[in-house]
Amino acid sequence: MRPASELAQLGAVAEALGAAAVLVADEGTDRDLFVTLAVLAQRTRRVLLFGAVTNPHSRHPLATAAAFASLAELAPDRIVAGFGAGGSRVLTPMGLAPHRPFAALAECVEVVDGLLRGEAVDHQGEFAVRGGALPWSPGTLPLAIAGRGPRVERFAARRADWILLAGRAIQKVPALVEALRRVGREARGRPPAIAWNPNVAWTEAMSAEMRAHLAYMLVDMPAEERATIDPDAVLERYAIAGDRSSVVARLSDALRQVQPEMLLFDAHDYSVSFLESAAALAMDAGAIASHNEEVAHGVDSHRRP
């Protein structure tokens, strides 16, 4: 990532171009998630700001809840609290190897939600909370969950307002999204919103960078899926890549099938020209939010390797 001040400036540009959201990853070797979101909150007025995503291990869930509640004071109705089980990029540099990552994620979501509601929380499990409370919290926040395994995805469908979907084979996404929406309707009467990052690359340089990005994503994929992947075909399977005209056509077709509530683009290039290019491509591919006829796309400021 770039310095928080630079990201905030680009976030304001993305907002002016019609972006619906800015997503910031929580990697321990990058700028701090919550400092960056705070600066973005001060420089933008409309976009949703996602923590995309933090985890239960590198920061205590009570501290995480306090940080999200503080952001909600800065940017009311614009903060989305995002969680995942934690991947190799964040856990390995810290020497963390959680034994039950899914259990910790599920516990974290419930504890954070209770704290944001202003409840006094006692918890003993993968982590401990003793008499924790945030009586000043402005209230609960929309919840986003990301994960590449079926167990996390089903949990997200039952529990989250947003599912952050990435690292899935493009041709399998329509059926997966249909199944996740069904799980959400059955569990609580409404489907989760889908924020989909299909890994889009429309220049040779972006395609080369995408191959490097997918290489680290493969490390965190479920073993049974990883075993079926041909390294030479990974870009074709997990990305929409090629020249601009073919990408627009393929992306437009994919969007018709998936109908995500939000289309996400990785920040291949931290520049105004890239944001303008991404916004134009989103428009040409038909990434339009039916409820307000504005472009429904987000910029994910996840740093590339």
Image: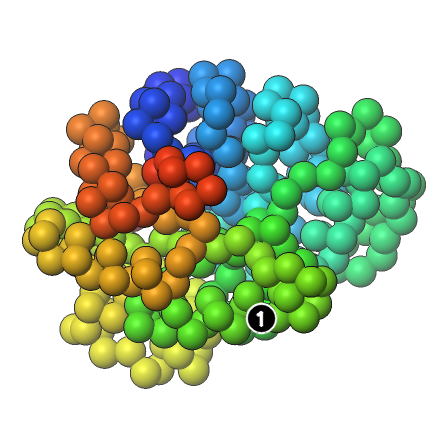
Residue at 45% from the left image edge and 50% from the top image edge:
261
Mark 1 Cα shell of 10 Å, populated few (<14), some (14-19), many (≥20):
some
In this view, the residue in front, 299 or 191, is 191
| Coordinates of residue 152 in the picture (x, y in percent) | 58, 66
Residue at 48% from the left image edge and 70% from the top image edge:
178
User: In the rendered image, which quarter is residue 266 located in?
Assistant: top left
Q: Is residue 220 visible?
A: yes
| Coordinates of residue 272 in the picture (x, y in percent) | 23, 25
Local secondary structure at mark 1 = helix
User: In the rendered image, which quarter is residue 256 located in?
Assistant: bottom left
User: In the rendered image, which quarter is residue 166 located in?
Assistant: bottom left
Which residue does the numbered mark 1 point to in the structure image? 182
Q: Is residue 209 visible?
A: no
Using residue 184 as the reference point, say whether residue 29 is left or right of it: left
Residue at 38% from the left image edge and 38% from the top image edge:
293
In this view, the residue in front, 285 or 53, is 285
Using residue 128 as the reference point, say whether residue 24 is left or right of it: left
| Coordinates of residue 224 in the picture (x, y in percent) | 43, 82
Amino acid type, callout 1: Arg
Vertical arrangement, residue 35 with respect to residue 206, above or below: above
In this view, the residue in front, 165 or 55, is 165
Residue at 58% from the left image edge and 33% from the top image edge:
79
| Coordinates of residue 170 in the picture (x, y in percent) | 31, 68
